[in-house]
Amino acid sequence: MLDSSLTADVPLGPFEGTLVTVHSAKSKNAKQHTTTDCSQLRTSAVTTVRVPLDAATVGRLCAQCWSWGPWTRPGSGLGVFLRALGGVGLLFQLQCYAGPDEDIDWDGEELQDAADLLRSVTAHEADDEDDEAFDEDAQQDARWLRDRVFGLWRSAAQSLHQAESTAAMFPWLADWVKPKLTVKKHHLKELRGQAALFVDPTGILAGAAAAGMSEPDLPVSDPAFGALGKSGDIGKGLTALWHGWQHDASHSRNGSTRPSNAVASLMRGIRSNRKGYDQAREAAELLVASWAEHARAAVAAADPVPTQMVKVTLPEIKEKTPHRPEQGFLHGLDSWTLGVLVTHLTEADWGRRTLTLHVPALVAERLLATSWPLACEPLADDTEPPNGDAHSPTSHLQPGVFDDTPVLERRPVSLEHLRALRTFAPDADPLFIVFSTSGGAEVLPLTVIEKRLADGWQGVIVAGASDLPASLIKPWAERIGTRPETGTSLWPQPALDADDPRFGAELGLEDGGPLAAWLAFDDRDRERNLRLLAIARGVHDLRTLDGGHDRDGRGRAVPWEVWHGLLAEKALDLKPFKSPTGDWWRRGSDIPLGVLTDVQIYTTNANPQDQGKGHSPMCRHSNDRGVAADDDLLTPADLLGRDDLRNHWCSKCGGYAVRRLTETQLSYYRAAHRLHNLAQDLDRQGTGHHTDLETLAAELAVLADWHPIGELHWSGRGSGKWRRIVGDLQNKVRALHRRDTP
């Protein structure tokens, strides 16, 4: 197993001297650990201290803690740097593919013999001769060896790419890492030479020639193909035969043009004893042989000497996910393209995924015409290969970019910084508080920050969700407690009585925190969700939290559990605020919206003229995605003033989600419902319904003095109308009291 521990000779650059927290036994020379949970820390008497990160500290570090321990928050500059070094990062990659693998038991002579055998088999295929003269086991062994060599070359190239690209982000590592990279480059060159043994330069030309051939006139009317069916079936079959042969021939690195695969596909589904079967098969083989002969003629007429320089940029690496294998770089390239790379490579900047090829004109034409997923462009013969550092000095990661310094000393963030954050700390915060002179303080998803930087935005990162004070988050998490036992609903039955202390609670902020925490997968996600919920609550418009899917197709910035903490799925009961007209069951009390005027209501579609119902952003019909940038934002006044929405909403979710009410808004919502109930009680007085007038008077007195929490008086929007409504009801109570008093 490779030892990739941090050693004292590794330059720490601007992070040297940064204070880090370590734990150790009380022995003077005891190893230092980054976590008290380390299995190597076998004592209950643990000492915790803050020490400067320097050579002395590195010399006492526990190797296990160094590689995988939580040194510091992953989103900090020091955290990103240490993650870039540890685990399977730079220190590991520098030791990988730095020389021959001790498990490899083949030599150059064995490789040459295997390459000669496969080339002989290909030559027999081209002459349409039987290859049974070659031992099948020997062929399989040779193919396995070829694939193994190419696999080693790809892996070594990717390791060198990771090492070079990582080192480039931290310029203080340049002198230290240079000799180690040189060793890796030398070994990669040896592997490329071994892989090139299995590539036939003439076969590369043949593949390029086959790719450049235009679809020929197909003999649809030839009676020899009658067994294929009607004229239309013959045309489709021969077209498929052409495309199948061209695909196979153009993707081969050894010029294999054997017709049997394409012909077998053509004849599949046709019984071998059918009349005309043998004639059709023979005619198809002759047709394919004519195409192969045309390709060989093009190769014979082409100049095999490399005459043109081509710059090739490999695609970025996309990490493996549960639903997708690793993609990009050298993964997914066909055998012809890999053959070109190992045969004609002259210069390589693996860190920037840029290769320079010197190829024959026929190959250059193929690369420049259809090179996906490679990006190819011609180079003049006197063009110098790219050299030097592509990163500007300000793009290098250093203290002050994230949260390693006081806010006053923060440095502007760049796309390179965020690339390092995504690469080495993929679990870093998805939401950040940022500051710019153009927009002030904002809460933005990482993807939105990247888009703004690409458009020239300048700003600094103030804090992420993980930077929020533990003195506030931990007590909040403790008050919420653990998730209720299995079988207990997280959404209790809502209270229907406006006098119930729990009435409307499912709409309030207080119920949002437990949902965000209890819906989390584990305790670590529980605190993370609460931090994200806290940082998102200060956002004015929740649509700005939608950064879309990132470049790897991963989910949106805000987890769906946090959306449950931000939004309430229960619809607002706006009956108290409706006009006092119409039948008794539907008419309202015309109570002013007051502090509820600015309540935000989000829906996927607020226009009945557009196709589709309106859904809550958390509805299953909208894939539980949360609020998106193109959602519609409404207010309670919009719901009261529009009759066209009643039949437009989804019957499952109610059509919208309400941003959770603040304590003041929820208090007013409850007061409005109590006032509306009192108005209804008075309307029914004298119609067989009797209410204690003394109780009504006492409740109205309480409502007359309603004011926002924390304020002695209410003088905001709707306060005057509220008092008039309460006053009218109080006068009505007095009148009823005088009437009933003898």
Image (cartoon, grey):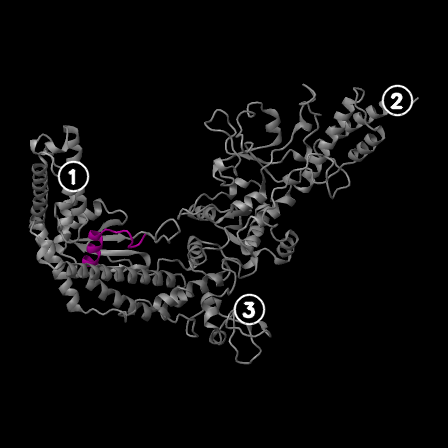
Quadrant into which the C terminus falls: top right
**Residue 257, visible in the rendered structure:** yes
**Circle 3 residues within 10 Å: few <14, some 14–19, many ≥20:** some
Identify the residue under disc 1.
266
**Residue 365, visible in the rendered structure:** no
Distance from the alpha carbon under mark 1 to that under mark 2: 100 Å
What residue lies at 68% left-to-right and 42% top-to-bottom? 663
* Towards the viewer: 406 or 559: 559
Three-letter code, disc 1: Leu
Distance from the alpha carbon under mark 2 to that under mark 3: 77 Å
Judged left or right of residue 336, residue 608 is right
The picture places residue 603, in percent across and down from the top left corner, at 53, 34
**What span is colored magenta in the figure?**
328-345
Residue at disc 1, secondary structure? helix
Judged left or right of residue 731, residue 335 is left
Quadrant into which the N terminus falls: bottom left
Identify the residue under disc 2.
740
Three-letter code, disc 2: Asp
Q: Are marks 1 and 2 in contact (CB under 8 Å)?
A: no
Disc number placed over residue 36 in the picture, else none: 3
The picture places residue 666, in percent across and down from the top left corner, at 68, 38
